[in-house]
Image (cartoon, rainbow, N blue to C red):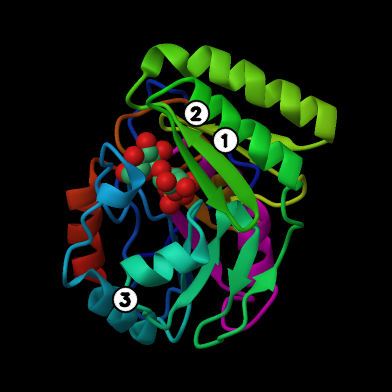
Amino acid sequence: MTIAISPHAPLPEDDMPLSRPPQLGAGTGLSLFLDFDGTLVEIADHPQDVVVPSDLPQALSALSERLEGRLAVISGRALATLDRLLGGVAIAMAGSHGGEFRPAGAVEVEPLADPLPRPVCQALDAFAQENGGLVFEAKPFSAAVHYRDRPQIGASLYDFAARLAAENGLTVKHGKMVVELSMPGSDKGTAVNRFMQMPPFAGTRPLFIGDDVTDEDAFAAVRRFDGGGVLVGPMRRTQALWRIDSVAAVHSWLEEQA
Ligand SMILES: O=P(O)(O)OC[C@H]1O[C@H](O[C@H]2O[C@H](CO)[C@@H](O)[C@H](O)[C@H]2O)[C@H](O)[C@@H](O)[C@@H]1O
């Protein structure tokens, strides 16, 4: 299938149906970027409770091989966590919302951001402790507070984090029942840009599959390389050009590409 995509194509309206993404057939020159939570694994109540299908690491590894290495997972999770959850599969990865970067087969993690100042992490952690039921998650280049167990705290948590961000020159991200702080200059879009400057991604047209608003930076980035985003889940205002209904449907689509 030939796909024609322009970075200047109009964005879809939020009530406009988006079709399934194109197939990664031989000779299409496409590369593939995948988000993790809500895309490859179902959302769970707590970050440590996600269930990784036992065949997922091998499926990613086989697809990466078929695409001659043009596959990467780009996640908000720490790379060390992704390694543990995916059994150390040797595919390309970026973690901590673009703060950590590692090409396929490499051992060294390349930082693409500076770590958060310790007092900021301590302040976020203290807010989580003082508002029982919040989960503080420290990552090498960002820190997150999850409020899924106390949704009513979401607005005050966001205000608190936004104030910390303004006082310290940081970036605040608001994902699914989670508020995160990181140093400016790294997000999933910068991770896409970095991969697209190096082989085997350079010169290809990237697809990015993701579910969260934090994936929108990557949806915008892939359009600049004549590629497109694939939104997972219900339609919303998005920069994605295609849509897949659910995590299960992502798995089916990945199987079709094998
Ligand atoms: O970029 P992603 O791979 O989608 O990671 C985004 C965040 O995912 C994790 O939190 C989310 O998933 C949890 C498990 O399903 C869920 O409990 C939580 O409410 C979600 O926000 C992860 O813990 C974060 O570090 C990632 O940034």
Secondary structure of the residue carrying tag 3 is loop
* Amino acid type, residue under disc 2 in the picture: Gln
Which amino acid is tagged 3?
A: Gly
Residue 232, compared with residue 21, is above or below; it is: above
Most foreground residue, 28 or 88: 88
Q: Position of residue 77 (x, y in %)?
A: 48, 55
**Segment tinted magenta in the rendering:** 189-217
Q: Is residue 203 left or right of residue 255?
A: right
Q: Residue at x 49, y 28 (%)?
A: 129
* Residue that carries the numbered disc 1 in the rendered image: 125
**Residue 103 image offset from top left, x and y in percent:** 57, 79
- Residue 106 shows which numbered tag? none
Q: Earlier in the sequence, mark 3 or mark 1?
A: 3
Q: Is residue 163 left or right of residue 167?
A: left
Mark 2: secondary structure: helix
What residue type is disc 1 on?
Asp
Q: Where residue 132 sits in the image (x, y, percent)?
A: 41, 23
For label 1, the SS is helix
- In this figure, which residue is indicated by the disc labeled 3? 87
Kindly check if marks 2 and 1 are in contact, taking CB atoms under 8 A apart as contact: yes
Residue 29 seen in the figure? no
Disc 2 designates what residue?
129
Q: Quadrant of the N terminus?
A: bottom left
Q: Is residue 240 above or below residue 223?
A: above
Residue at (62, 64) in percent of width and height: 100
Q: CA distance from mark 3 to mark 1?
A: 29 Å
Residue 206 forms part of the magenta stretch:
yes
Left or right: where 180 falls relative to 114: left
Is residue 167 part of the magenta span, yes or no?
Answer: no
Question: Is 223 placed above or below 106 here?
Answer: above
